[in-house]
Image (cartoon, rainbow, N blue to C red):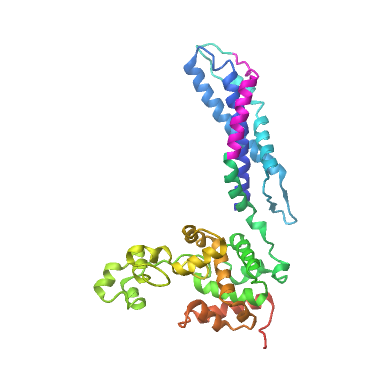
Amino acid sequence: MTALWTYLMICGLMGLVGQGTRAVVSLGNSNVLNSTTANQQSSFSAAYLTLSLIIGFIAGVLAGLALQSTDSNGAWTVSVPDRTTLLGLIAAGYAGTDFIEATFAKLMPPVGGQPQPMNPPAPPTPAATDAALQALTGTVQTLSSHVTTMAASVAAPAAAPATSTALGGIDFAGALHKVLPAVDATIWVPALTGAFGKYAVNTPLRIAAAMGQFVAEVGSQFSDLEENLAYTAAELLKYFPDEIRNQEMADQYAGKREAIGNLVYAHKNGNGDVNSGDGYRFRGRGLIQLTGRTIYTEFATAIGMDLDHVPDYVATAEGAAVSGCWFLSSRKCLPLADQWRLTDITVIVNGPAKLGLSTRIDYANRFRDAFGVPIPTS
């Protein structure tokens, strides 16, 4: 439903632009604005413009619905509106309210105690039409970049099919729902399948091994995409004994996420000192929890993104999936997945401590079972 609502919002905005242009031109050239009853007519003009924009928005939404269809299950098949479609929606908004003038003629309150006839707006002059078209062109160009971003969101659920030949023909969406029912498939199926295809995580065993690692890192709801760092005093003493040296220091830092990150990650993984802010800026994010300036820089170079933008990107579903699959591919984990050497993969991901090893193996096997493939014998 998220994609449909986003699409309808785009359609409504286009209809609003079309009707808004018509209303402005009409008011600017009508006899209404030239009336001597300025105060009363001013109220009318505001009401007229407001209603026009509302009706234009509705016209755009209705036009957008008319352009869509449903699949065999009755679900809307939302497609990305191209530039021609957007201009068509604007035209629908422009032409969709011819009845407004007649309606206002009946609803307009008497002026000066006598009913006032309302003449329809005069046709726009060529100069006014040119000005309106220039304004409309500028508006369309301004909205273009926003529409492109919104359209990507609209298209996302349909971007990657649940069953893909690029993924060995497996029903990934079905397996995700079975093993991780709390995960929002409309967000994560396209994000994960896109990343799987990009980094050759393209066999049932590779996908299952990757999912086992991801669940252990961010939870069974895929909700912990950023390292929290909101440790209590007791947790600080337990997890960071080298940095938090006594109870007084633990009490001082407890619950202070940014201060904790800058302290415990200072001079590690390519970070600067405490005052650099690197520890908190490059804290763990994504499905593999990238941590430290060094690996963030390596990932930024790999995907061609400015380092300053990478932390925010990795905290999104797309960025989390891409960074996770990139890590497994760049660290040579995929051949290990082919051999089902899950413990070796865990050492690469989590280090010698192998925290959550049982969880990683358990969920990898759950996905493998859902895909219907056996453990390799050699």
Outermost residue to the right: 72
Can you give x and y, in whole percent of width and height, for residue 340 in the image?
A: 62, 83
Outermost residue to the bottom: 378
Query: Depth check: 131 or 55 in front?
Result: 131
The residue drawn where x is 53% and y is 70% is 220
The residue drawn where x is 60% and y is 45% is 147
Query: Where 76 sits versus 232, above or below?
Result: above
The residue drawn where x is 52% and y is 14% is 111
Query: Where 309 sits versus 245, above or below?
Result: above
Can you give x and y, in whole percent of width and height, for residue 29 in the image?
A: 59, 19
Query: Depth check: 366 or 319 in front?
Result: 319
Which image quarter: residue 86? top right
Q: Which stretch appears magenta?
A: 117-141
Secondary structure predominantly adopted by residues drawn in magenta:
helix
Q: Quadrant of the C terminus?
A: bottom right
Query: Depth check: 191 or 51 in front?
Result: 191
